[in-house]
Amino acid sequence: MNTLFVTKNNTTIHAYKAGDGDNKVLLIHGNGSDGSFWKPLLDHCPEGVEMVAPDIRNYGKSKGKAIDASRSMGDVVDDFLGLIEELGWENYHIACHSLGGSVTWEMILKDSTRIKSATVVNPASPFGFGGTHGVDGALNFPDGEGSGGGVVNPDFVARIKADDRTTDSDNSPLNVMNSYYWEPPFVPKDIDVYLNGLMAITIGEEHYPGDFTPSDNYPFTKPGKYGPLNAASPLTKQNILAELTALKSKPKVLWVRGGKDKIVSDTSLFDAAFLGTLGAIPGYPGEDVCPPQPMVSQTRHVLDAYQENGGSYKEEVFENCGHSPYIEEEQRFRDLFYDWIS
């Protein structure tokens, strides 16, 4: 496995690279991670396949100006299209995880004619993360409350900034990983690599978790202007269903999800509204005012519409896995994925 750096527009994108061949694969990581999380694939790259796993801007070793959330994931998409241009790829597959799903839906919108397929692993809903209800992704409140930088646990952020590698608190990054990234009691053999990847996030109001402002609406914060979590808010994604279904060229989609995922779920423990139903965040106004986000149901609704309009998708459920089935059941995922891209 090699590394490479590409600098464009005052932003340097770092990526891991494995293999060589005509079958190209772009691997897009999720939040709280970096490109090293694709180690289970990068270490077992098949013959004839070239894989590149970049760090999203200001994750891992990628550095640049703040992500402009008003462009949704546009800044990240532009970074990766620039990387693909530098690599000279004429077409490629995408595999993504979690927050990388938000990037991938928009990669498809921007570059559908060159994308051969997309494999979305526990992806963020096409309508964004937090702040919506119903399968059509309607906003709970007009300013996107329930999403963005303000819904991240501040103690977790502080512990990343302090490089806390202990297990002293439920909010310690290592404990968060082992509680939510995969289904306990599973702990991956490369846990130190993954912890390093999590701890390499650039912290700050313009980066992670991003800026936010107070609101009168639950959970009393609304998304700001900068950073990946604000870019993942639903405010810029209200037309995505129409845009995806209107594409003339529709790459095939493989949707892989863990049956025990606690992060991307219809009952997500990272959704402020669902936490409100559990009494974990005070002041919850009730499900009639602020319903939880049905993340999995939203993705299925969008993919069904995508298929009805000429696209195709296949759903695979790893029943005993949590948020990271490609790490939790490496060989099963590799067999599935390599057959898919062949």
Image (cartoon, rainbow, N blue to C red):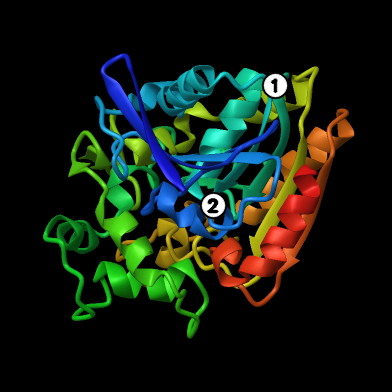
Look at label 2 and name its amino acid: Leu
- Residue lying farthest to the top in this orientation: 9
Look at label 1 and name its amino acid: Arg
Q: Quadrant of residue 108?
A: top right
Nearer mark to the viewer, of 2 and 1: 2
Q: At numbered mark 2, what does the secondary structure look like: helix, strand or loop? A: helix
Identify the disc placed on residue 226: none
Assess disc 1: are there few (<14), some (14-19) or many (≥20) residues with their C-alpha within 10 Å of its C-alpha.
Answer: some
Residue 129, visible in the rendered structure: no
Who is closer to the viewer here, 39 or 287?
39
Q: At numbered mark 1, what does the secondary structure look like: helix, strand or loop? A: loop
Q: Position of residue 240 (x, y in %)?
A: 62, 28
Residue 7, visible in the rendered structure: yes
- Residue lying farthest to the bottom in this orientation: 185
Who is closer to the viewer here, 163 or 53?
53
- Compared to residue 133, the image places residue 230 above or below, namely above
- Compared to residue 32, the image places residue 188 above or below, namely below
Residue at point 44%, 70% (across, down): 180
In this figure, which residue is indicated by the disc labeled 1?
Answer: 114
Residue at point 31%, 35% (across, down): 62
- In the displayed structure, does residue 79 sit left or right of residue 268? left
Residue at point 57%, 71% (across, down): 328
Q: Position of residue 166 (x, y in %)?
A: 19, 76
Identify the disc placed on residue 42: 2
Q: Earlier in the sequence, mark 2 or mark 1?
A: 2
